[in-house]
Every structure is written in C-alpha cells, then in structure tokens.
Image (spheres, rainbow, N blue to C red):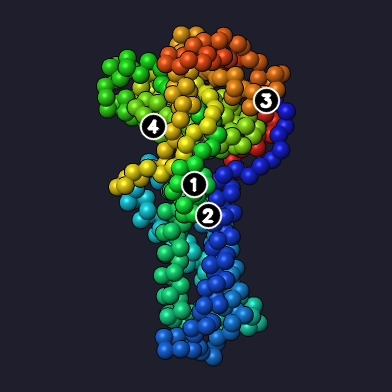
Amino acid sequence: MLSAQPKSRSIYQQQVVAIAICWTIIGMVDAFHMHVISNGLLLQRTENYHFGQLFWSSTISAILAGAISGYVLVFHLRRWSRQRPFGLSIAVNTTVITLLNILLTVITYQILTGAWGEEPVLGNVSLLQTLALLTSPYFLKGVVLWVIVVLLTIIALNVNEKYGHGVLLKLLTGHYHKPQEEERIFMFVDLKSSTSIAEKLGHVQFFRLLNDFFADITEPVIRTRGEIYQYVGDEVVISWNMTKGTMHQNAIRCFFLIQEAIQKTANRYQDRYGLVPEFKVGLHAGVVTTGEIGVIKKDIVYSGDVMNTTSRIQAVCNKFRVNILMSKYLLDQMRLPSDLYPLKRVGVIELKGKREKVELFTFEYSILPRPETDPFAFT
C-alpha cells in the first residue's frame, strides 16, 4: 500500500477558489463604481440608498455566487457540457449561472435590508425595498455586468480544458509568443489493435469507442496535473512540465489511474462494443521548444527530439509484450521508491532513426495499489 501523501487541492478545487476570489473582487469594485456614478444623470439615489448596505450586499452576494456557481460550473455543468454542442453548452451554462446569481443577489439583499433596517427579513418594508431594487436601473446594470462575467468565466474554463490548466494566463501574458525551451515529460497513449477493432465495429462505432476512451482518460490526466497535448487518430499525447510530472510521481501515476478508469467502465464497454479497450504507453522526458504557431488556427506546439523518441518507445511495447515502457532518463528524474514501484529492466535498445541507445524499463505489474490518502481525490 502506498504511503499517505500530503493533501493538495485538486485543479477543480483551485478553479472554484479562483472563481470565488475573482467574483468577490468584481463585486467589491462594482459597489464602488455604483457609488461613484449614482446620483448622476442615469442613476438617482433615493431615500433608501445606503453605501454600506450596497457594498456588503454586493460583496457577500459575489462571494456566495462565486463559490456556489463555481462549484456548479466546475463539478456538474462541465461534465454535462462535454457531451453537448459548444453553442448549446455556452447558452445553457450562462443562463443557469446567471439566474442562480440573480437569486443569490436578491436573497442576500433581502436579508441585509432587514438586518440593516432592524426590520423582519420578510416584513413589508424589507420586501418593498427589495422590489424597488429589482425595478431599478441599478439592478439592470448589475444583471448585464454578471452576464458578461459569467460568460467570460465559462470561456476561460473552456480554454483551460482545451490547452491545460494555467495555459490561459500564459497566453494572455504572451508567454508562448516567442519560442522558448523547457524540459517536459511526454506520455504517448495508443489504443491496441485499433485496425482490427475498426474493421469489426465499423468506422462510426469505432469513433464512438475512441470518444468514450478519451473521455475516460481525461479525469486521470487532470488529477495528475497533466495536459492533453493532442489527439492523433487513436493516439493521445499527454504532457507535464518537469515539476508537475515528478511531483507525487504524477506522470507514472497517470498510467495506473487510466488503467483503473478503464477497468471500472469495463462492463459499459462490453455492453456497447463487445470488448474492453487495451492500450500501451511510452514515457520519456527531455528539452523541447514551445511556442505558438499558425496564423488562422493558432496552436501551442512542442518541437524536439524527445517527441520522436517517446513515440518510438511506445511503438516497441508490442515487441516486449508490455503495456508501458519508459526511458531510464525519465526514471532518474522521477526517483521512484522501489518498494512501491517494482521495476523491470527491458534492456538497452537502439531505436529506429537514432544513434544513441536508450535503456528502457517497465513495471512488474500494471495496477498500482490505491493510496490511503489520495491527494487528487475529488470532493
């Protein structure tokens, strides 16, 4: 059994916290902005206006909306959206979250109005003041603002899904505008016997099988801080920067978590397709050049010999009849505890097209025991 590892927020939890913080700041800034522009040509203060009440109402409702809406978006609507058209997903998510925010704003304002005026929360005075808010230009402006905020939040989450966690900030700051060198870990995951499976199922069913397989491996990738770099036919390329990939042996753990995910859904695959997909994995690390490429359809691209080497390592899995192979260089970086990861040396081989020989390793077994404390478990 793996020893307990230090607790760490999952990427999903980090996203919820980030949404709550950003929305709280926006709520506070909006309250100050409303105060500045009030009593002007467009907005007139009434006898019920009180800046303290406006500020705390805006701030508290933003905190609640950020935490609750963030949780709903990240842990529920995101999964629903993955199986829906992008336009429908954006429309439904924006509508649901906006209505939820309006409800939270009204409830918060109602409670604070009663508390501030020492009136019953559902008393006539409090209800009339809340009704006045709902029919005022202040409220309409707030609705427009939060529709925009919700829409931008959803777009940011989708960009994170496409490029990987943390990449959006790097895109905004121009991190990839100029090519840069960095050391990364790569995992090439390839579906076994894909040609014969496609012939048996037909192209449409095989495409559905691939979609299910790629969907099932997504959670393990996210839980181990990985980034899905690209899909190439029946193959998916996963990548980590060296720090995230070696932390808690993430790059290796990802393989075992994928194995576990496919085993858990084996009955579903058997019912739908009459088989359970098997896959092989090649792992390697090295320096790559990273940068944006293209004009009309820009993309973030990794370029370097490590890509070809990883692909060729994965290609010789069949030769040695194993599901996973990795280079000694990567293993040296990972520093795996030998009692938890029993390694098996395959040998030193010369990969096609390379002058240098690469020493390869695999594991004695392909299923890793579950840790007592999983730092990436969902809550």
Q: Nearer the viewer, residue 79 or 149?
A: 149
How many numbered marks have been drawn onto this rendered protein structure? 4
Describe residue 201's horizontal placement relative to residue 311 as left or right: left
The answer to which image quadrant residue 243 occupies is top right
Query: Marks 3 and 1, Cα distance to the nearest angstrom?
Result: 27 Å
The residue carrying mark 3 is: 335
Q: Nearer the viewer, residue 141 or 247?
A: 247
Residue 81 percent location from the top left of the image = 40, 46
Is tag 4's residue or tag 2's residue first in the polypeptide sequence?
A: 2
Query: Marks 2 and 3, Cα distance to the nearest angstrom?
Result: 37 Å
The residue carrying mark 2 is: 70
The residue carrying mark 4 is: 231
Query: Marks 1 and 2, Cα distance to the nearest angstrom?
Result: 19 Å
Residue 324 can be seen, yes or no: yes
Q: Establish if 219 lies above or below 133.
A: above
Q: Which numbered disc, 2 or 3, marks the residue closer to the eye?
A: 3
Amino acid type at mark 1 = Val
Is tag 2's residue or tag 3's residue first in the polypeptide sequence?
A: 2
